[in-house]
Image: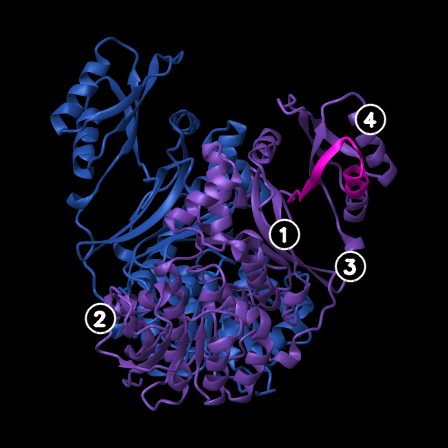
Chain colours: A purple, B blue
Amino acid sequence: MSVNPLRIGLAGLGTVGAGVIKLLDANASLVSRRAGRPIVVSAVSARDRQRQRDIDLRRFQWVDDATALAGRDDVDVVVELIGGADGPALTLARATLAAGKPFVTANKAMLAHHGLALAEAAEANATPLKFEAAVAGGIPVIKGLREGAAANELSRVYGILNGTCNYILTRMEKEGLEFADVLADAQRLGFAESDPSFDIDGIDAAHKLSILASLAFGSRLDFAHVETGGIRDIRLADLQQAAALGFKVRLVGLAAVEAGTLLQRVHPCLVPLAHPLAAVEGPLNAVVAEGNFVGRLLFQGRGAGEGPTASAVVADLIDVARGESGPAFAMPVAALAPLPPAPPEGRFGRTYLRLTVLDRPGVLADLTAALRDAGVSIESLIQPAAKADGTALVVMVTHECADQAIRAALAAMAALDSVAGAPLFMPILAAEG
Amino acid sequence: MSVNPLRIGLAGLGTVGAGVIKLLDANASLVSRRAGRPIVVSAVSARDRQRQRDIDLRRFQWVDDATALAGRDDVDVVVELIGGADGPALTLARATLAAGKPFVTANKAMLAHHGLALAEAAEANATPLKFEAAVAGGIPVIKGLREGAAANELSRVYGILNGTCNYILTRMEKEGLEFADVLADAQRLGFAESDPSFDIDGIDAAHKLSILASLAFGSRLDFAHVETGGIRDIRLADLQQAAALGFKVRLVGLAAVEAGTLLQRVHPCLVPLAHPLAAVEGPLNAVVAEGNFVGRLLFQGRGAGEGPTASAVVADLIDVARGESGPAFAMPVAALAPLPPAPPEGRFGRTYLRLTVLDRPGVLADLTAALRDAGVSIESLIQPAAKADGTALVVMVTHECADQAIRAALAAMAALDSVAGAPLFMPILAAEG
């Protein structure tokens, strides 16, 4: 066994970068025993050298231009924690792989947009590209799908992939607050970004889902076709009505192979209380994978933050130190199947609908006529008491029906004079399978 | 990438052995893409060649003596699914590793008893020893601890490691049945062995726990010091009282490092309803690991059966095919810490106590005096109505106190004339941490 240390060039010294340094300090002996050799930071790079940090950087070489890390003789592996789909992160990734050095990243946006090209570069240079920290923080779900469930044909992979959204939804639910109030508080507490769009509009979860789907199905990563919705329009009343019906509301990223096509969707969903995802609260993440031999696997843990993300980055580094290699997406890029996106006419399921209507006679007759005309059958309908402003909510759960029928019914209902604002719909996750 | 197939010698053609053959048939193309080369069964061995099986064995070489698989030129890796701590399984393991060939096994009993010696043999011959299927069936928890959580100092690892016990406990709970009735039914249905002791007395869970502990803590595997209890003495009344107090009863295997000592215990426990283990029902398994950077990780899935176990065996084979290697217990045996067993005086926690007493005045005074004398403080006490036979149950939950005090109090109470039969105690798992 080699006793040469594995020397890291670390780009990005934000929360996660600092976490990696702290972990390698705190767990140095144990990491060395598990890796077979010491793992040490050799050189670092960040935008602002002068920024106040709670780690001492004087023991590392400082590099102004992160790209230079790739070419340094004292760097065996580059860890990229800069972020951003393009720009310096992508330049550094290309330079590192071109230099034949392993590249470890937590950058889901870059992988979603350039993952296949980077994986090809890694193959061409016979060097690992690793990204355990890019999905679900500290949960080893990349390894779980790439290796742990590798013997299975997976039919679905889905989960709670964005801790900020889950934090907001569970606080709304527990504290009886509206979305905007919790978001503002989360921003104040640092649980949400000042520009929260990537999180709350589902884009971050979509990045992660596209990576999981490629690993799960051996299909070409296809971020462009992830149907993406977020949680901005969820009201407290939706959580309350869902609870009354026996559901929690969760932002679920779901990918499935159906008849040779790839469905990828991030959308708020109703999750039955008995489903393991209903118990996932606060900033936790969870991923479910369903395989033809293993059945349903669940991985759960902290999806973000300094410690969990550093844990995932260093797990990759230990793999690199031990000489673990192999293709980034479990098989060569050329072997990944180019699955076409699932056509909308294939969707089928129960759906939650919520409309705001004017509180006047005949409204329900109009709504139910629109549903009937679209071929949508209603399992239950609740009309809570009208509000002081003369509007009322109508909440419906449909029987299993085609997604397209739901959309047609929603369009017809939205056009009614008596319907105020855009209707909201949420798919209902089946309890089993 | 090599296109030579990886050729398996498969020993043992019971449920799991047949499952491995079925999986390699059903998922051949996908396994080959993920492994980088085909994985094929070359030769097989089992006790009874003539036994009726639902797989066609004529395409494989038949070997009467499993040990001979190790030396065959057409065998690159041996898969051992014979079972048993010693005997042919152990002989085959030694012969395979001595021949410098990778050895894949689901045999937790053999690993619990001989895991370190086998790991040393694997190291000496620079060949992998792999056993994902030995713990928690299809859940990739060996990989999860060995690699996924490798960057962490883990403080505790615990979980539901025996599906038979969990099946029995959850059926008792849901159907209001006594232990013996569910056991008999489980035996009839094939969910429990005709000699169920390994499962229901906690021995199987103890085998698995000793393996997890070594991986989690980088400590020498120490099955001899697992404190092992089972579920034979659990009554329906215990589940009902636990439910009234806000708990489920689960057989929990728990390992923890405390002040440089290793606690390993398999025991029925009260699990708070909010804890993820409370939601683990039927034959499912689940493992929780708590790390100093990652926080709490949960892995859940099917813990036994043809499909899940075959999934884990083939995951190991894919690792072998891809050239993944490294020490069996994440680090060389010489680097594993020889942690002494935790002394009993270190235990501390809330505890559930259940006694059967004669229904006569003064009994509670005697019991509470015994508790006071032992220094045990009671948080709550329930005495359900007496039964027709003149006995009554007394159920108590203690405040946090030393385990030794509980044991002293139990001994004193068991000696009372008014106490019938042995008292039962169950530790209460903390909701957090």
Residue type for callout 4: Ala
Give the SS element for disc 4: helix
User: Split into 4 quadrants, where in the image is the N terminus of chain B?
Assistant: bottom right
The answer to whether the residue labelled 4 contacts the one labelled 1, judged by CB atoms less than 8 Å apart, is no
Q: Which residue is mark 4?
A: A365
Q: Is residue A380 visible?
A: yes
Residue A32, image quadrant = bottom left
Within 10 angstroms of label 1, few (less than 14), some, or many (20 or more) residues?
A: many
Within 10 angstroms of label 3, few (less than 14), some, or many (20 or more) residues?
A: few
Q: Which residue is mark 1?
A: A229
Residue type for callout 3: Pro
Residue type for callout 2: Asp
Tell which circle, 4 or 3, labels the residue nearer the N-terminal end.
3
Total tally of numbered discs in the picture: 4
Tell which circle, 4 or 2, labels the residue nearer the N-terminal end.
2
Which tag is nearer the camera, tag 4 or tag 3?
Answer: 4
Work out how far the residue at label 1 is from the one at label 3, CA to CA, in angstroms.
Answer: 17 Å
- Horizontal and vertical percent for residue B372? 14, 24
Q: Is residue A422 magenta?
A: yes
Tell which circle, 2 or 1, labels the residue nearer the N-terminal end.
2
- Horizontal and vertical percent for residue B199? 43, 47
Is residue B342 toward the left or the right of residue A81 in the image?
A: left
Residue type for callout 1: Gly
Q: Which residue is mark 3?
A: A343
Residue extent of the magenta highlight: A409-429
Is residue A217 toward the left or the right of residue B85 in the image?
A: right
The residue lying toward the viewer, choosing from B196 and A36, is A36
Work out how far the residue at label 4 is from the one at label 3, CA to CA, in angstroms.
Answer: 32 Å
- Horizontal and vertical percent for residue B57? 66, 71
Specify whether disc 4 shares its chain with disc 1.
yes
Relative to A97, residue A220 above or below = above
Q: Which residue is mark 2?
A: A56
